[in-house]
Image: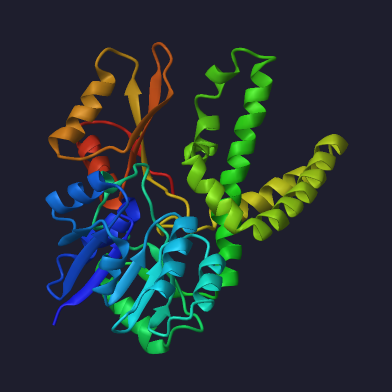
């Protein structure tokens, strides 16, 4: 007997889940999206079995419903279940990075056929849309599940079983602790990165050459400020209480740092920086976290014609895809540091071996 799964929203996350689940013979994947071109792409590229432009029609067939739209839209789709005459139990989950808003809506549902388990696969890509979908996107990533009053242990187990092909690492959390933790290590850093960019933009009025100097490390630490503004406004809104609290704490922290700078107490400043370094260096480097990370490889190259092309051609000959390239330092007559970013540790290691065999000096950050 087929297990019918409807995925509402075929962007990067929804389509990647579809790609992971579709090869399982037991699953029959129905895709729903408001964009006809997205549905057409998903069907023609065999990401889904069936495309539906009508949400109700897509849901009435389903045993499982995965809401993979932006948070506010997922809330609307969840609330719309109250208007449907479901003939069988429907296990519903979402992929939103804020859980409390979804669960509040779920608890307000009157439809007894709906069981809701919150979900958040903590993985992503620098690309977006159905075209960027990958079946292995969630491999080794943390996948948070948040049981609710509208779900049983059996429902959670059934959902976890359905999602096993994603090869994620499942973690059960309460909605409040999930929102607090993702606020600290994902949502808040996005806001701070945007603030740093605004500060640089302000100082550009005084120093016109500032953008040239910001092309290296500053771009690295503010990379996440390039994320989709509309998507992040939605996230900030739904996690606004946590964000407000974190901002208050941040302002207090910055006041403390301001005193450290002004008072010029060498030992206190070293202790502050050392404590941050120790904690940061102790963070996991092998796990996928809430903010997209890459596996970097540093390569020493000579400042000469064709140096960069030679490195990239060597990797291309080994069918290795590079996610990002950055020249960290190129000066006439000396070695230059090239940073290559890869989507997986496996590609990083193969690239390191390939370049070492070709005589290049490389380094992997530990």
Quadrant of residue 198 within the rendered picture = top right
Towards the viewer: 217 or 186: 186
| Number of numbered callouts drawn | 0
User: From the viewer's perspective, is 326 left or right of 25?
Assistant: right
- x and y percent of residue 265 in the render? 84, 40
Residue at the location (61% across, 50% down)?
A: 188
User: From the viewer's perspective, is 232 left or right of 269?
Assistant: left
- Asked which colour scheme the image uses, the reply is rainbow
Q: Is residue 300 above or below residue 125?
A: above
- x and y percent of residue 291 in the render? 47, 51
Towards the viewer: 94 or 142: 94
Residue at the location (48% across, 57% down)?
A: 71
- x and y percent of residue 157 in the render? 35, 83
- x and y percent of residue 196 in the render? 63, 34
Q: Is residue 240 above or below residue 5?
A: above
- Residue 120: tell me if it is visible: no
User: From the viewer's perspective, is 162 left or right of 193?
Assistant: left
- For the N terminus, the image quarter is bottom left
Quadrant of residue 122 within the rendered picture = bottom left
- Residue 231: tell me if it is visible: yes
Residue at the location (73% across, 44% down)?
A: 270
Towards the viewer: 245 or 349: 245
Towards the viewer: 118 or 169: 118
Q: Residue furthest right?
A: 263
Q: Is residue 93 above or below residue 351?
A: below
């Amino acid at each position: 007997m087929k297990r019918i799964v409807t995925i509402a929203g075929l962007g990067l996350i929804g389509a990647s889940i579809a790609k992971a689940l579709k090869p399982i013979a037991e699953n029959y994947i129905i895709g729903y999206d408001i964009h006809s071109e997205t549905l057409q792409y998903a069907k023609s590229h065999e990401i889904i079995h069936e495309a539906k432009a009508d949400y109700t029609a897509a849901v009435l067939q389903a045993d499982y419903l995965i809401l993979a739209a932006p948070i506010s839209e997922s809330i609307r789709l969840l609330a719309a279940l109250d208007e449907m005459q479901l003939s069988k139990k429907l296990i519903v989950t979402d992929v939103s990075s804020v859980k409390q808003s979804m669960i509040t809506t779920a608890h307000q549902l009157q439809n007894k056929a709906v069981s809701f388990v919150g979900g958040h696969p903590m993985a992503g890509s620098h690309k977006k849309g159905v075209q960027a979908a990958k079946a292995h996107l969630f491999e080794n990533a943390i996948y948070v599940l948040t049981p609710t009053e509208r779900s049983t242990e059996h429902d959670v187990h059934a959902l976890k079983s359905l999602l096993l092909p994603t090869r994620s690492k499942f973690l059960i959390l309460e909605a409040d602790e999930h929102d607090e933790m993702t606020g600290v290590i994902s949502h808040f850093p996005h806001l701070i990165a945007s603030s740093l960019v605004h500060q640089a933009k302000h100082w550009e009025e005084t120093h016109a050459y500032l953008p040239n100097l910001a092309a290296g490390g500053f771009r690295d630490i503010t990379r996440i400020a390039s994320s989709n503004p509309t998507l992040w406004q939605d996230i900030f809104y739904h996690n606004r209480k946590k964000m407000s609290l974190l901002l208050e704490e941040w302002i207090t922290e910055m006041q403390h740092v301001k005193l450290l700078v002004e008072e010029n107490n060498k030992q206190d400043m070293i202790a502050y920086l050392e404590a941050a370094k120790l904690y940061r260096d102790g963070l996991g480097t092998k796990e996928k976290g809430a903010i997209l990370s890459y596996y970097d490889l540093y390569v020493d190259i000579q400042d000469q014609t064709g140096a960069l092309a030679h490195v990239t051609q060597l990797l291309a000959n080994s069918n290795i895809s590079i996610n990002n390239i950055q020249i960290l330092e190129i000066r006439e007559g000396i070695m230059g540091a090239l940073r290559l970013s890869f989507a997986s540790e496996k590609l990083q290691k193969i690239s390191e071996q390939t370049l070492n065999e070709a005589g290049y000096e490389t380094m992997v950050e530990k």
